[in-house]
Image (spheres, grey):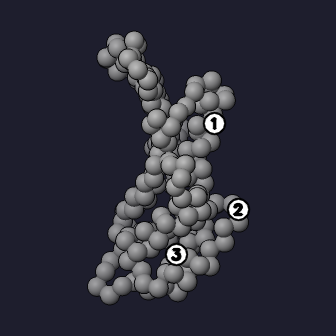
Amino acid sequence: MIRWQDPDIPTAETVLITTDERYLLASALLQPAPPNSAGAAISIFWLHLYVLAAPADLQVWYQRFMLAISIASAFADFLARDLGLPTSDERPAAAGILLHAAEPLSKLVATAGLSPLPDTAPASQFLGYSIADPSGQSPDELTRHLLIELCRDTLHLRDFDRAMDAIDASPTSAD
């Protein structure tokens, strides 16, 4: 555990690494509201999960993205129910997905049957980010939106609409 030097904001961070200390698996950051805060005090609890993902098709990536998005809600439930820390929408929950590879992401996302746009190359990084909004998209809509961004803006695929239409939203294993 690491503690920052500012005595007014006792921030704590912890990390989880593999037993051989080669890979970071998760990190968490807790920053309680400053003492004697005027008005509504806001505490921050940040969780990063690092996952080494196997190559998969869009159906599996749909399930993985759905799982990642659901973590924000599950995390808020954990804080409120298990730790007794109230949460609020004053600072809405946020979820992000970062895919990063040394090679093009087409090595991680199977694109069989789909072709790239002419004169394009798939990128090696994708970032999708969302901020919770009660009147916003459903998890399925958000996940599909993120996959469309991945196909269109990162993999530069054409005619991926058919592949998106074929995605089954029923819950299955995400590998």
Q: Residue at x 46, y 35 (%)?
A: 90
Residue 60 visible, this angle:
yes
Residue 15 visible, this angle:
no
Task: Assess whether mark 1 and mark 2 are in contact (beta carbons under 8 angstroms).
Answer: no
Callout 3: helix, strand or loop? Answer: loop
- Of the numbered discs in the image, which one, if any, rests on residue 110? 3
Crowd class of label 3 (few under 14; some 14 to 19; many from 20; radius 10 Å): some
Q: Residue at x 46, y 49 (%)?
A: 131
| Mark found first going from the N terminus, 3 or 2 | 3
Q: How far across and down, in percent of the image, does residue 75 sit? A: 58, 39
Give the Cα distance between marks 3 and 2.
20 Å
Q: How far across and down, in percent of the image, does residue 156 sit? A: 38, 77
**Which is closer to the viewer, label 1 or label 3?**
1
Task: Identify the amino acid type marked 1.
Answer: Asp
Task: Assess whether mark 3 and mark 1 are in contact (beta carbons under 8 angstroms).
Answer: no
Q: Quadrant of residue 13?
A: top left
Task: Identify the amino acid type marked 3.
Answer: Ala
**Which is closer to the viewer, label 2 or label 1?**
1
- Of the numbered discs in the image, which one, if any, rests on residue 171? 2
Q: Residue at x 31, y 17 (%)?
A: 5
Task: Assess whether mark 2 and mark 3 are in contact (beta carbons under 8 angstroms).
Answer: no
**Which is closer to the viewer, label 3 or label 2?**
2
Looking at the image, residue 60 sits to the left or right of residue 37; the answer is right
In this rendered view, identify the residue nearer to me: 102 or 89.
Answer: 89
Residue 40 vertical position relative to residue 108 in the rendered view, above or below: above
Give the Cα distance between marks 1 and 3.
34 Å
- Of the numbered discs in the image, which one, if any, rests on residue 77? 1
In this rendered view, identify the residue nearer to me: 154 or 25.
Answer: 154
